[in-house]
Image: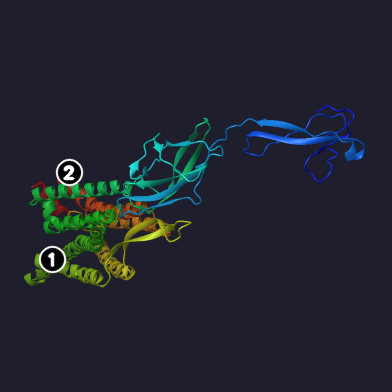
């Protein structure tokens, strides 16, 4: 627009004079088109001088504008709320529906493809799995809007790789003009983390293998040397009972390692294992230390009686194998009554306790820990522990009064070391178990409990039998009551 005599320009159609629409000696206006508009546009204008007197205005003029279209990128909308996929350990599969929407302001056709498949599970549409870089069918809502219905499916919820977290996939949109867009879709995957022992089980099985191998080797040595003076002096039947007791006690480790499985299908076996745990440990402990108790009792009585004059045969009746065996049976009966009462009143069962819940779905547990539990466990554990400690007290007493008897007859020296070692392990392990009780770790619990049982049985076997093996090969090197007799018997 070039008109030097014009003072200002008024845009036709406006109510008021726009004195600043086009200033004096100016000939350019800035036109801004509406968003997403294209094609032909125009405006009409006139020029005036002398304050806008209509008699001194110019004729009307029309300025035409051609708006060149610029293609818009297609738009993909994220789902309003993040979809949730709940995967339970009892289900073989789980799935959730996902609705994608989008559009193109230019009205161009859109092609939607899967550019990055989910890491866990498969993306389905109409029951058909969409492969990586595969096309996604669209439904046209209107001339500019589209939608797509998808399903994210996890085929195996029991798979350990399926864990609580965020699963995602990426879709890519391309319109006919070549403009493109992509959208990352996130799905919240919920699954209960059934925490189970793993590495500690390997150690537990090694513990069992070591003790079982040692029991078999010592049983073989005891049997082939049954008539050797060292074995005869150690009382062959009681040595066998110690081996049986340690074997039963070690079986407790197998009950500690058993759980309900990754999907809970092993619950019945786990319950049975929990119920058997006190039986194995109590009877193993009682046969081991009960036999050691009566063995030391017999040794003490024999050496005491043989120092007296005028003793009749009837004084040895209370030291017969049958009488002493009945003592062990009587001790075991007390354990039997305690274990039976526990089993029928409130048996140990494998129970899972929830330790963590989802922040959004607060009734969904994302983590649980399982172990053997009974409402009356503390009562019966206390009773059994008191009885066992009383027996250990008797054993310690007879260890003291037989301390001067040669080790071929009495294991008091090595038994004291064994009991002290077991107490040290127990005192060291209890604080660890208490510190981890609020947030128990399955590996820690299994390892500590298995280690306590293993070390207790292992030390008993080593300290009871190894000195006897040594004396068989190298002779009796220690003094004490009976030293001369056993030395002559070994040499002969």
> In the rendered view, would you say 407 is above or below 283?
above
* x and y, in percent, of residue 151 in the image: 39, 47
Residue 310 appears in the picture as rendered: no
* x and y, in percent, of residue 60 in the image: 80, 34
Measured in 3D between alpha carbons, the distance from the residue under mark 2 to the one under mark 1, in whole angstroms, is 32 Å
Q: Nearer the viewer, residue 165 or 471?
A: 165
Q: Nearer the viewer, residue 76 or 110?
A: 110
Q: Picture quarter containing residue 291?
A: bottom left
* x and y, in percent, of residue 347 in the image: 26, 67
Q: Which residue is mark 2?
A: 474
Please tell me how crowded label 1 is: few (under 14), some (14-19), or many (20+) other residues with Cα within 10 Å. Answer: some
Residue at 13% across / 58% down in the picture?
Answer: 235
> In the rendered view, would you say 154 is above or below 403?
above
Of all residues, the one furthest to the right in this rendering is: 50
Horizontal side of residue 463 vs 32, given as left or right: left
Under circle 2, the secondary element is helix
Please tell me how crowded label 2 is: few (under 14), some (14-19), or many (20+) other residues with Cα within 10 Å. Answer: few
């Amino acid at each position: 627009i070039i008109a030097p005599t014009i003072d200002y320009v008024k845009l036709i159609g406006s109510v008021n004079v726009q004195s600043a629409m086009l200033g004096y000696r100016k000939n350019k206006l800035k036109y801004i088109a509406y968003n997403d508009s294209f094609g032909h546009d125009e405006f009409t204008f006139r020029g005036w001088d002398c304050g806008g007197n209509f008699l001194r205005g110019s004729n009307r003029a029309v300025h035409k504008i051609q708006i060149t279209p610029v293609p818009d990128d297609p738009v993909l909308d994220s789902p309003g709320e993040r979809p949730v996929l709940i995967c339970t350990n009892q289900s073989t599969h789980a799935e959730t529906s996902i609705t994608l929407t989008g559009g193109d302001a230019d009205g161009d056709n859109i092609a939607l493809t899967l550019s990055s498949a989910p890491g866990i599970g498969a993306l389905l549409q109409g029951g058909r799995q969409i492969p990586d870089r595969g096309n996604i069918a669209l439904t046209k809502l209107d001339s500019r809007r589209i939608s797509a219905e998808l399903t994210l499916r996890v085929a195996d919820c029991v798979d350990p790789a399926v864990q609580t977290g965020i699963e995602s996939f990426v879709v890519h949109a391309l319109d006919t003009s070549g403009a493109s867009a992509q959208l990352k879709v996130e799905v919240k995957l919920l699954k209960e983390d059934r925490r189970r022992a793993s590495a500690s089980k390997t150690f537990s099985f090694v513990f069992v293998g070591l003790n079982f191998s040692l029991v078999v080797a010592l049983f073989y040595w005891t049997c082939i040397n049954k008539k050797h003076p060292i074995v005869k002096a150690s009382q062959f039947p009681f040595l066998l009972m110690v081996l049986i007791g340690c074997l039963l006690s070690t079986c407790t480790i197998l009950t500690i390692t058993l759980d309900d499985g990754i999907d809970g299908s092993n619950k019945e076996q786990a319950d049975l294992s929990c119920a058997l745990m006190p039986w194995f440990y109590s009877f193993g402990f009682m046969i081991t230390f009960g036999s050691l108790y009566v063995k030391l009792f017999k040794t003490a009585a024999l050496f005491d009686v043989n120092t007296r004059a005028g003793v009749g045969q009837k004084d040895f009746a209370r030291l017969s194998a049958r009488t002493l065996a009945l003592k062990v049976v009587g001790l075991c009966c007390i354990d039997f009554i305690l274990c039976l009462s526990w089993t029928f009143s409130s048996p140990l069962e494998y129970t899972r306790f929830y330790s963590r819940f989802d922040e959004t779905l607060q009734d969904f547990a994302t983590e649980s820990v399982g172990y053997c539990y009974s409402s009356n466990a503390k009562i019966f554990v206390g009773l059994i522990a008191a009885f066992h400690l009383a027996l250990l007290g008797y054993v310690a007493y007879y260890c003291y009064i037989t301390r001067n008897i040669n080790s071929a007859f009495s294991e008091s020296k090595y038994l004291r070391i064994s009991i002290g070692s077991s107490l040290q392990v127990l005192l060291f392990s209890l604080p660890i178990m208490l510190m981890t009780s609020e947030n128990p770790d399955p590996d820690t619990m299994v390892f500590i409990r298995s280690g306590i049982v293993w070390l207790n049985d292992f030390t008993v076997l080593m300290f009871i039998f190894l000195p006897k093996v040594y004396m068989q090969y190298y002779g009796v090197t220690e003094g004490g009551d009976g030293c001369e007799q056993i030395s002559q018997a070994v040499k002969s």
